[in-house]
Amino acid sequence: MTKLAGMASSVVLVAVGCASTPIASSQEPEAATAANWDGSVRSWGSLREVLRLGKTEARVDCAEAVSRAHAYGVGALEGVSGEILIRDGEVWVSRVVDGQGQTLQASSPGEQQATFLAVANVPGWHDVAVQEAVAAGDVDAFIAKEARRLGFDMAKPFPVVVEGAVSGLKLHVLNGACPFAAPIPPDSPQAPFKLELGTARGIVVGFYSEGPPGELTHHSSKTHLHVLVEGEEPQMGHVDSMGLQAGAVLRLPRVR
């Protein structure tokens, strides 16, 4: 199993991060030369099609999804056989092997087929320091508050990244069946892998959307987030619940 490539060497002011310069204050003026996100989100399939209607066929390979620079995204493998996280063009996949989650960075993204995938290409980010801990039930509202402060059009979905420490983390990895459509017994060969961590460090990638549930987000949330947990054997999965610890960094795209 591969280590979390590049994370340790890219630490600046927070334990995990992909920024190569110190984290800027959220009050710092935007650099005039900063590259901006164009506001678009590409998607293949929808959560409703895949998880509710059972249409889990392959729709796109990950090499196509990351063919444009600075790709960030989340998705599910064909047959809902695992999870996908894309971090600045890196494709990470997680599957259940012998009842445990196995996470690898894909060396051949074209071999990874997604049944659902949402991707945004973001060359520049606003960094917002988390000054006080944010409880798990308040993360969506915290993201929305900061997005409104930065002038986002809240009617449109936008990508989100969190770097650093999180709390109360609960994640799962799909294993060939959807736990949202119908309960799956723990002893089923299709039972998802689940993991709970009181505290963890890593990178979270996903989307915030106030649009109709079932497209990018589930009915119970305005975010769809996947987390890549740092460690000797990194673990990636879909976030079921998560708080933010003080010192973490929320990243929102710079917009045109």
Image (spheres, grey):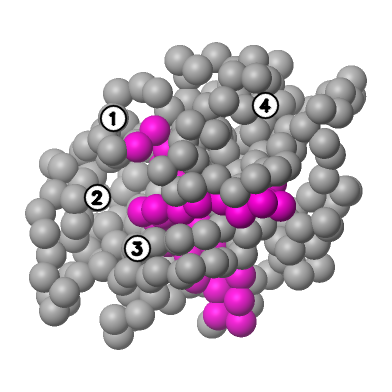
Residue type, mark 4 in image: Trp
| Residue 20: image location, x then y, percent | 85, 52
Residue 22, above or below 146: below
Residue type, mark 2 in image: Glu
Residue linked to disc 1? 213
Which quarter of the rendering shows the N terminus? bottom right
Residue 198, above or below 17: below
Q: In 3D space, how far apart are the residues under numbered discs 1 and 3 (Cα atoms)? A: 20 Å
Q: Between residue 185 and residue 216, name the one nearer to us.
A: 185
Residue linked to disc 2? 57
**Which numbered disc, 4 or 3, marks the residue that appears first in the sequence?**
4
192 with respect to 72 (left or right): left
Which label sits in the foreground, 4 or 3? Answer: 3
Q: Give the residues drawn in magenta, as a range.
A: 221-249
Residue type, mark 1 in image: Pro
Which quadrant of the figure has residue 232? bottom right
Q: Which mark is residue 172?
A: 3
Q: Secondary structure at mark 4?
A: loop
**Which numbered disc, 1 or 2, marks the residue that appears first in the sequence?**
2
Q: In 3D space, how far apart are the residues under numbered discs 4 and 1 (Cα atoms)? A: 24 Å
Question: Can residue 161 be seen in this snapshot?
Answer: yes
Q: Secondary structure at mark 2?
A: loop
Q: In 3D space, how far apart are the residues under numbered discs 2 and 3 (Cα atoms)? A: 21 Å
Asked if residue 67 is among those painted magenta in the image, a careful observer would answer: no
105 with respect to 140 (left or right): right
Please give the name of the residue rendered at 35% of the width and 45% of the height, measured from the top-left corner: 116
Give the overall secondary structure of the magenta segment.
strand
Which label sits in the foreground, 1 or 2? Answer: 1
Q: In 3D space, how far apart are the residues under numbered discs 2 and 4 (Cα atoms)? A: 30 Å
